[in-house]
Image: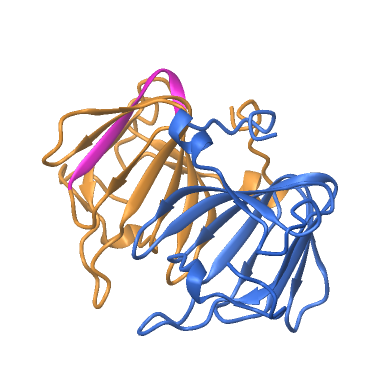
Chain colours: A orange, B blue
Amino acid sequence: MLAAAGIVLTAAERAAIEVADFGLGRLEQTGLQIVVYINTERVCAKELVLFPHQTCPEHRHPPVGDDPGKEETFRCRHGLVRLHVAGEDEIVLRPGEQWTIPPDTLHSFEAGDEGAIVSEFSTRSRDDTDVFTDPRIVR
Amino acid sequence: MLAAAGIVLTAAERAAIEVADFGLGRLEQTGLQIVVYINTERVCAKELVLFPHQTCPEHRHPPVGDDPGKEETFRCRHGLVRLHVAGEDEIVLRPGEQWTIPPDTLHSFEAGDEGAIVSEFSTRSRDDTDVFTDPRIVR
């Protein structure tokens, strides 16, 4: 799916693709496949790959110390993604379209019929401090 | 070239592609074509498009106020790019390969025979504070 979208990975990156089922054990419905390009103290960039109708459950990125929380821009590369952000109507992103989510703001997203590839440009990722709405979720 | 690499732009983004000749008036040799996806106070993401052997001249991103200077990760998407970073041997990036340049560090880069597309993931871009080695350059 990444190759079909013109995205080239190194062998090490292919081997390190993260498969997140959020501890729910139903990956095809609730989960995410993640390629992390870079995650420094200041900048993070990833590709998020979603199966058809796969959902990333509602969560937010709270402040940590001096960091006001992770700011994320989602840019759709392939397929379609429906983004739900607190305080906004549903946002539908098609290839070339993007949306920026402020820090500490609840959001979830779901791929359309073909799945989706979404580039994420953000400040540092600290998955262990993310706050999910569903208390069963373990990240 | 972007479309061939699977990169989809909106009409507004196509219309806003920045062509930088650095004030030297010889774009095909020294210049850069830039698509800015996002540039917030904290995060910037761009695609840099280079013609065959087109060069981005040596410069650095100095500290500005509380900001220690722009940190950049260059990820080659298409073609080949030769990156020169102060204190390093020449770095050759092919598709899927990347390099992170610390703040305030002199660097320049040049595309190979086919040109190049390079994704840049960085902290905020402030082009007007960049310091170029060649005093004739105006950004």
Residue at coordinates 55% horizontally, 75% vertically from top-left? B130
Q: Is residue B97 above or below residue A33?
A: below
Left or right, residue A127 beside residue A77: left
Left or right, residue A45 beside residue B28: left
What count of labels does the image hold? 0
Left or right, residue A55 beside residue A18: left
Can you name the residue that lies furthest to the top here? A113
Question: Whole-percent x and y of residue A122?
Answer: 39, 56
Q: For residue A57, which quarter of the picture? A: top left
Q: Is residue A61 above or below residue B66?
A: above
Tell me, yes or no, whether the highlighted magenta stretch contains residue A108: yes
Residue at coordinates 75% horizontally, 84% vertically from top-left? B87
Residue at coordinates 24% horizontally, 45% vertically from top-left? A137
Q: Is residue B129 above or below residue B120?
A: below
Question: Whole-percent x and y of residue A93?
Answer: 36, 28
The answer to which of A111 and B54 lies nearer the viewer is: B54
Residue at coordinates 15% horizontally, 36% vertically from top-left? A88
Question: Whole-percent x and y of residue A33?
Answer: 47, 38
**Quarter of the rendering occupied by the C terminus of chain B:** bottom right
First to last magenta residue range = A106-116
Question: Whole-percent x and y of residue A54?
Answer: 36, 26
